[in-house]
Image (cartoon, rainbow, N blue to C red):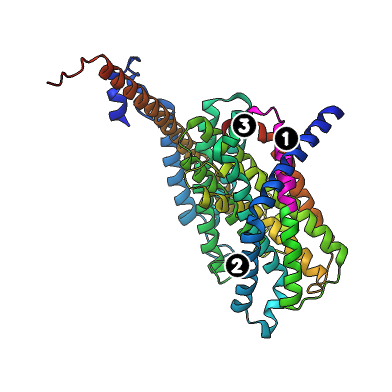
Amino acid sequence: MMADARAVAGDALLIAGKDLRLEARTRVATNHVLPFVGAVVMIFAFALDPDTGVLRRATAGLFWVTVLFAAVLLIQRSFAVEQADGVSDSLRLSGLRPAGIFLGKVLSLIAELVGIEIVLIGAVIVLYGVHLKGALLLLVTTLAATVAIAAVGSVYGPLATGLRASETALPLLLLPVLAPVLLAATRAFEIALGDTAGGGWPWAGMLGIVAAVYLTLGLAVWGPLLEET
Amino acid sequence: MTDLLARRDLSTGPEPPEAALTTGSTGSRILGVCALVSLAILVLLAFVVTGQDVNLGESIRIMYVHVPTVSLAYLCMILNAVGAVWYLWKRSEFADLLSHAAGELGVVLLGITLISGSLWGRITWGAYWVWDARLTTTALLFLMYVGYLAVRAATPEPRSRAVRSAVVGIAAACLIPIVHESVQWWASLHQSETLFGTLSPKIKGTQLFTLMFSFVAFGFTTAWLLMHRFRVAWLAERAAESELEVAIAERRAEATEPAEVVS
């Protein structure tokens, strides 16, 4: 049992390392996704007049909507690279455990998303003029939401790639599923930023539950998915 | 589809029995008659026998559609998830097609729920749509199952289609408890459960009977539709197989024909 878990963890680190090395070489996250995130932050400011305070009050929601848009791009990219040059066949024949591949994909997506979120938090502090208050709640919410997004993305990513219209199928599949994550993360952020009174921890707990459900689901279904997609 | 199956004489396989070319059977016809009769009785009960509600007024009649359709939609989605798990476990075509039929019917029923709920909301709350937790999450559930149908439609290979859609079906089912509990989790405008919310239901007499009967009428209709949708999907699979057999037989025939001599 322990040996199995260690082997799965080893496979996960191998896949995560492969994905992050690929990312470091191609720089899609830094050269494409980050500028896209910057553009979205600016566009929100144009749409919601910054002088009226609407922008500052909506910061929590805008932050997580931007993260979701970036996540869709990163997930699409993460699984599209597996389709080229028979990589998916190589993965199937590699002897790596499906659970390990799934966790590796989750880890690499978490790493990329955390990078995007750090830059995004800096951007909203500077551009939207928000002040961080509940730092611990903010940190826990961000981590739980990021794990949930990465887990959901790693379940739906291989499903959507290879479809006849994968570019449109992934957002259609992903966004409704991630809506509870958006809602909980936004509410917890509003409380952490001091915009709303109340306890933010139940929302962080809900994010943890969503993350746990989709991590379990991913571990259960990645075997058949790897065989058939 | 019938044309395709009629072309089986080109293939090496046996001619399918005539009964296989139709989605009807004695059982489905009996079920269809039960559905039609019960729907007619429901219309009579809803518009003639029962009167206005003290609180809801005429809008109570929308409940006779809204409540059973949402319950049956959830049932279809549970059936969809059961079929999906069954498929991943046993790789049974029956489970895959049952899951598909239930998913598609669930989308239709959830669509009727959203439309009827929206009409009820216009009368009761003064707006077709309010950002109420249950409404919003039901709409999200609807979109998730539209995604399920999109995945099925976009995957031509049957085995891959079955696995992909099974995973989407199971993942979507994971959201059903969140939808159900959403009224408790978030502040909600939505009417609390009319029938099963308390030990003593909030409606009584002929209204309660009509609501209970609406479950019977829509239950028969859903079962009838499910049966036919399953059989259409099964026939579509056979037609696709037949098409492949025809193509193979044609290629074989071409290979055995003598080549044309070019002078």
Give the extent of the magenta segment.
A93-111
Q: Residue A99 carries which label?
A: 1
Label at residue A90 = 3
- Give x and y (percent) for residue B222: 50, 40
| Amino acid, disc 1 | Ala
State the residue position of label 2. Answer: B130
Q: Residue B98: where, in percent of width, then height?
A: 52, 32
Judged left or right of residue A5, residue B38 is: left
Q: Say which mark, if any, is on residue B71.
A: none
Q: How far apart are marks 2 and 1 (CA)?
A: 42 Å
Callout 3: chain: A
**Is there one chain holding both mark 3 and mark 1?**
yes
Q: In this view, does A226 lie to the left or right of B236?
A: right
Residue nearer the viewer, B7 or B262: B262
Residue at image coords 61%, 44%: A79
Q: Is mark 3 on a helix, strand or loop?
A: helix
